[in-house]
Amino acid sequence: MVAYNPVFRGKWTMKKFNATVINDIWPEVLFFTAVAVMVTFVSIKTPHSLAVSPQLLTVLGTVLGLVISFRTSTAYERYQDGRKMWTNITSASRNLAQMIWIHVPNDRLPRDGKPRQTNLESIIEKKTMINLIQAFSVAIKHFLRGEDGVYYQDLYPLISVLPRYSSCSKDHIDMLPLWQASEDGEHPYDHALHSVRSAPEASKDEGSASGTNSPAPTTTSSWFGSKRMSRLPRAKTFDPEKALADIQVHRPLKPARNPPSSSLFDYIPFLLVFKWMWKKATGVKASVLNGSNRNALGHKIQSSTSDSNVPLEITIYLSNYSAFLMRNGLLQPAVAAGILNNVSALQDTMNNLDRIANTPLPFAYQAHLRMSLWIYLFLLPFQVFESFKYLTIPATAFASFLLLGFLEIGQEIENPFNYDANDLDLDGFCLAIQRELQEITAHPAPDPSSYLFTHWNQPFAPADRRTAAELVKGTSEYQFAKSDEEGLAQLKHTLIRSWRDTDDITRENKK
């Protein structure tokens, strides 16, 4: 692999600049550089020298360096753990979808007086459950970013099929937790109107399924005025939500991505003091959900996880489906155990991601480390002036940039689930899972004999390059041997020659 320098790779854009910590630490670096300027010019231009003994400089610098290194290493370990957990979600989703799609039979015998389920109904059943597997990763993404509810463009079309009530009364009291926790009061759910699906909506869906091209909903995209699902593409040429179902909904759906917008305060953080004073006077609390990206000290606000546990609700339905399959004898014991193990893996991964997102380093540790570093950098020019003279100014600036940068990097990556440029690409992970699940359901699951014994297969190459179709015609020495034992011995001899030829061909420097 050829290594490259990320600093000089590609063009330097504002997005790439935001991925660094320069705009986070430059006010502090400027302050400590100003202290160095003051110490240098006072000591040189006046008879008063501000230099002090540098005896503690080496000891304190070594201790602070080790502590900051530990802080950064701990944060990077959390970053890596988050990536591993998303790898586990991808693997478990893929395995679970394969087991449901391939091992759950389409042919069902009539049971308990119910009519026989058709192949189409069985495929619809399995495809719907695989959509729930896809919905799990999307729900985890919104859960980690502190985005409540299910009314998102990339989530609601996948889970809109789930029941809303625990009984037939269709009352608000009987609404299930998944949906009740998603109501915000601004768009109340009309239980009488939406308790059953209206015939016009069903006919519209039937028309679209039969090939009629119905226009996409284009009614007003206002958050408060729309009654149809309004799509707000994330980019002019990229709208992955178009690959999802077009479902009727009683309220406008939030976009799949809702990152905080950049402002002047992201590049001049000390101006946030005035914004903080204004919010204190008006009683507005700063949070990521209301658009604030930084606190009064200029540091990025970390979002907390969501209150509504949508991923847990989805795993409950997946577990219920596995119980239904086992209760009706539709699964082999080994496959049933595999499905349960993968559902448990999704739940365990959800718990681990919640632990990473909601367990920051203790406040006392972070506060003490930052205050100790500030004191060290403040006293640094007093200790090095005697040796550096005018070089005290760039030396202090460089030391501030170095130490504050590593400290800020640790704080930046300890929660890698938000919208920062250095965070994990959760949207990319979810789209990758979506593509893989669609690929699994596109697999026709043919009979192996339909592709094994064809002219495209040379199973014994390189020793025997005859095709499988030629071998099974009955003209090979394996079938016309005097006995089965002799034919098997010749076949084993061919396999040994294949191994020897392969070993000889694939070794470049073999003597």
Image (spheres, helix red, strand yellow):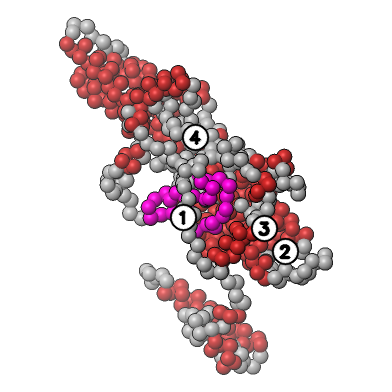
Name the residue tied to disc 2.
331
Question: How far apart are labels 3 and 2 at the CA level?
Answer: 10 Å
Q: Are marks 3 and 4 in contact (CB under 8 Å)?
A: no
Given this view, does label 3 or label 2 mark the residue nearer the observer? 2
Q: Residue at x 49, y 25 (%)?
A: 285
Q: Earlier in the sequence, mark 2 or mark 4?
A: 4
Report the amino acid beneath label 3: Gly
Q: Which residue is mark 3?
A: 338
Circle 4 — which element?
A: loop
Numbered badge on residue 289 = 4
What amino acid type is highlighted by mark number 1? Pro
Residue 456 versus residue 17 in the image, above or below: below
Q: CA distance from mark 2 to mark 4?
A: 45 Å
Q: Residue at x 55, y 50 (%)?
A: 155
User: Which of the two marks, 2 or 1, is nearer to us in this view?
Assistant: 1
What amino acid does circle 2 point to? Answer: Leu
- Crowd class of label 4 (few under 14; some 14 to 19; many from 20; radius 10 Å): some
Check if residue 231 falls in the magenta segment: yes
Q: Residue at x 42, y 39 (%)?
A: 420
